[in-house]
Image (cartoon, coloured by chain):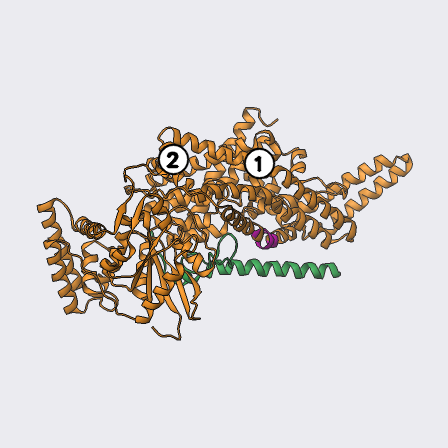
């Protein structure tokens, strides 16, 4: 029983983490620099520049 | 300047002039510095504290050759300067190529920004026999000029002191007026008057500068003008057309060329006034040029490039073999201990099958990744990667791509180990929207770092004797497929003319050992971080999907009954060995049945109706679905799937050994899977980036469908072809 409680807690934490990652990716900067391969908190990817304008549409 | 707010200092300059190096030196940041142009596509911000305690915000702008909106980075740099109006702009110039670098300086002076010129790489210039009189240049341009060496930090204190002094003066913007000849000057004057009278776009731009941009055909400014006041825009366009026709008639040229000629004329006139002197014969070939005579030779160059690539893989696979086996032994030891320590149950299963056999499979390749990144860092820091781009440029034109696409391909994993996300971002340097889109949609075909563990696992298992050679061939295959796909796109949905390209080759530099270690560690750490966070979480979720809901009660009872029957019959024969074997077989059948009955098992089994064509079983199908989240997940999922199906606690075989023993697997299946993994849908993060960079989700969706269909076709050809030829073994 105690194992199941731990398992449920771990799975919920993983779902929260992945959900947050997806939300940040989708809702991040318009220029796509909100997240990179190494994650959303990578300073080289997430900088002040993310607040800049969008790039031109290509279609 | 308001003393309570930090001084804003922007770093502007040509690509590869050393802006990011200076930015890192000043702010203590560790932004990636590459010995090739176009490292900075977006601007970055960092903090700097003066010795007086005053604060400054340093903005690293993308490298640009001009301030006319031809490419995205030019727009980013100019928009920042015009709209944000920094207190000071530090224009970083490559002192060894001063004439070309001053072209941007002239445009900054024309804009009128408070500016300091930093003469960077003054040591390189001196080595080339170039002597520069900074004071003389300062007197002529009427801006402070400070010689620096950004790499060592020499001169940066003086530079920042001059910047602070200039910021304190708070002088208004003072545009420089260069004469462009009678015709253009007259047109500029007329246009500036119209702009002033109508108050046209004057909140951000000076009238003469606006007029100049109209004459240069700056599409962004013209579009703004059209939206702001169509009547004035039409009037200005008429003048542009008139002067253009006149110049074409009289000189067979156009305004943009005249403007560029006069800017260079202005620069030459400045430099000739004892600013620059050559100690040696300037025709003497520099060391870099001499090396390039061999390394970029039309015939020898490509051969050397292929040899370097093969050497890189040989180096990586040869030297990483031993540390990879240490990692594997460590994870075996860990799982063995956990198995002995923990009571049976879901927690033990999750830790062993989900975490150790899942994430451990990815972490086990850390030494290999490290060796690969070290090799790539040598190529990059020395400047050889730029030569690879230069040589590939010729090939790219044949396939309808722009020379600038080469760097996007290389960043994405052109030499295995990159990442498609910065590759997609690097495509911003492309001016033609169609070429840019063709690049965006094909960069994900490169072998990024996430695909490496999958390729390494399968090549090590089924092609261990020729692992480096196979990786080399797979790299060539990735390029070939990406370029073919680009050509198909350029001939169909993205049809259009190719644009010309001039590749600038930075000088060769001897990489510093510290620099190599930093670059290697930065990338390896990203890999470890991703494995320890995202991959771990996905690995646990996939374990849960492979474990639940478990077998129905009736089937559980069926297996219990089978065990009882086996035990009863064994009691009569008293053969312990046979009993153990039969019980083990029942255990394996039960584990397999439970796995197939799980959520993931059902998905994988349903997909078998199609996946039999390229030879993928249900376990592989689950791994490939998981791979959409991140390609490393393919290894973790296979690890978990085979671990959950294993019932013998003493069996600590690695995933590689398990796959080699499994009757379903053979070299043809492995090759089909390698091909599929290389080319199927990009990972989720890349799809989002493609969508955002292209401005439409349609292209993100297109990349998923196009790539998967393409990969499925190739993998089916490999598998069915291999079967037909009897290579399956």
Q: Residues within 10 Å of mark 1 (few under 14, many from 20)?
A: many
Horizontal side of B282 relative to B392 (left or right) equals left
Which chain does the green colour mark?
A
Q: Is residue B466 above or below residue B396?
A: above
Task: Give me the residue at 24% from left, 61% from top.
Answer: B142
Residue receiving disc 2: B291
Which chain does the orange colour mark?
B
Task: Give me the residue at 43% from left, 33% from top.
Answer: B305
- First in sequence: mark 1 or mark 2? 2
- Return the mark for residue B468: none
The count of marks equals 2
Q: Say if residue B66 shows up in the picture.
A: no
Residue receiving disc 1: B317
**Quadrant location of the N terminus of chain B in the rendered image:** bottom left
Q: Position of residue B510 (x, y in %)?
A: 45, 42
Q: Residue furthest top?
A: B725
Q: Nearer the viewer, residue B673 or B622?
A: B673
CB atoms at circles 1 and 2 under 8 Å apart? no
Q: Say if residue A46 shows up in the picture.
A: yes
Q: Position of residue B42 (x, y in %)?
A: 39, 56
Q: Secondary structure at mark 1?
A: helix
Q: Chain of mark 2?
A: B
Q: Main secondary structure of the magenta part?
A: helix
Residue B534 magenta-drawn? yes
Q: Nearer the viewer, residue A47 or B283?
A: B283
The region drawn magenta spans B530-537
């Amino acid at each position: 029983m105690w194992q199941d409680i731990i398992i449920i807690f771990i799975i919920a934490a993983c779902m929260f983490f992945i959900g947050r990652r997806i939300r940040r990716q989708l809702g991040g900067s318009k220029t796509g620099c909100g997240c990179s391969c190494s994650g959303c908190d990578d300073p080289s990817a997430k900088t002040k520049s993310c607040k800049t304008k969008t790039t031109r549409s290509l279609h | 300047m308001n003393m309570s707010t930090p001084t804003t200092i922007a770093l502007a300059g040509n690509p590869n002039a050393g802006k990011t190096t200076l930015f890192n030196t000043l702010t203590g940041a560790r932004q990636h510095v590459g010995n090739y142009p176009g490292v900075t596509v977006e601007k970055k911000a960092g903090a700097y504290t003066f010795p007086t305690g005053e604060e400054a915000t340093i903005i690293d702008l993308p490298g640009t050759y001009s301030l006319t909106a031809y490419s995205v980075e030019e727009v980013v740099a100019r928009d920042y300067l015009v709209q944000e109006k920094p207190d000071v702009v530090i224009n970083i110039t490559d002192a060894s190529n001063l004439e070309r670098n001053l072209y941007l300086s002239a445009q900054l002076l024309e804009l009128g920004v408070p500016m300091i010129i930093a003469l960077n790489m003054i040591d390189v210039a001196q080595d080339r026999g170039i002597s520069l009189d900074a004071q003389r240049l300062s007197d002529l341009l009427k801006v402070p000029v400070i010689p620096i060496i950004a790499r060592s930090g020499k001169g940066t204190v003086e530079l920042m002191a001059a910047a602070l002094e200039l910021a304190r003066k708070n002088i208004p913007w003072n545009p420089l007026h260069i004469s462009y000849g009678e015709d253009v000057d007259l047109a500029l004057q007329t246009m500036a008057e119209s702009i002033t009278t109508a108050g046209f776009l004057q909140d951000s731009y000076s009238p003469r500068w606006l007029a100049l941009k109209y004459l240069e055909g700056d599409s962004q400014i013209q579009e703004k003008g059209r939206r702001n006041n169509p009547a004035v825009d039409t009037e200005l366009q008429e003048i542009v057309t008139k002067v253009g026709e006149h110049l074409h008639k009289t000189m067979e040229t156009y305004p943009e060329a005249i403007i560029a000629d006069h800017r260079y004329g202005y620069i030459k006139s400045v430099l000739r006034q004892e600013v620059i002197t050559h100690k040696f014969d300037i025709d003497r070939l520099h060391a870099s040029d001499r090396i390039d005579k061999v390394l970029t030779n039309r015939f020898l160059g490509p051969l050397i490039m292929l040899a370097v690539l093969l050497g890189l893989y040989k180096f990586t696979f040869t030297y990483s073999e031993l540390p990879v086996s240490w990692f594997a032994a460590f994870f075996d030891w860990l799982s063995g201990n956990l198995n002995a320590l923990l009571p049976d149950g879901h927690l033990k299963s999750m830790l062993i099958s989900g975490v150790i056999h899942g994430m451990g499979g990815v972490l086990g390749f850390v030494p290999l990744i490290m060796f690969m990144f070290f090799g790539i860092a040598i190529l990059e820091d020395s400047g050889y990667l730029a030569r690879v781009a230069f040589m590939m440029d010729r090939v790219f034109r044949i396939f309808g791509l722009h020379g600038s696409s080469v760097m996007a391909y290389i960043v994405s994993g052109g030499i295995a180990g990159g990442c498609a996300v910065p590759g997609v971002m690097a495509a911003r340097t492309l001016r033609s929207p169609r070429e840019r889109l063709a690049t965006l949609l094909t960069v994900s075909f490169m072998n990024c770092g996430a695909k490496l563990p999958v390729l390494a696992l399968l090549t090590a298992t089924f092609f261990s004797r020729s692992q480096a050679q196979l990786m080399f061939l797979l790299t060539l295959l990735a390029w070939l497929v990406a370029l073919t796909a680009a050509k198909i796109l350029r001939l169909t949905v993205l049809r259009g003319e190719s644009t010309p390209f001039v590749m600038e080759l930075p000088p060769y530099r001897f990489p510093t050992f510290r620099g190599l270690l930093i670059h290697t560690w930065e990338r390896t750490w990203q890999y470890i971080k991703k494995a320890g966070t995202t991959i771990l979480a996905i690995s646990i979720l996939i374990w849960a999907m492979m474990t639940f809901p478990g077998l129905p009660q009736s089937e559980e009872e069926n297996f219990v009954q089978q065990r009882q029957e086996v035990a009863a019959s064994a009691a009569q024969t008293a053969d312990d060995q046979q009993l153990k074997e039969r019980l083990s077989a029942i255990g394996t059948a039960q584990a397999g049945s439970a796995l197939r009955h799980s959520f993931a098992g059902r998905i994988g089994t349903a997909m078998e109706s199609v996946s039999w064509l390229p030879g993928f079983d249900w376990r592989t199908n689950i791994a490939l679905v998981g791979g959409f989240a991140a390609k490393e997940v393919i290894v973790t999922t296979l690890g978990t799937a085979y671990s959950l199906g294993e019932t013998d606690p003493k069996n600590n075989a690695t995933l590689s050994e398990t796959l080699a023993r499994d009757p379903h697997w053979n070299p043809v299946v492995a090759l089909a899977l390698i091909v599929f993994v290389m080319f199927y849908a990009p990972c989720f993060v890349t799809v989002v980036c493609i969508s955002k960079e292209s401005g439409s989700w349609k292209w993100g969706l297109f990349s998923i469908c196009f790539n998967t269909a393409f990969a499925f076709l190739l993998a089916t050809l490999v598998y069915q072809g291999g079967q037909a030829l009897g290579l399956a073994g």
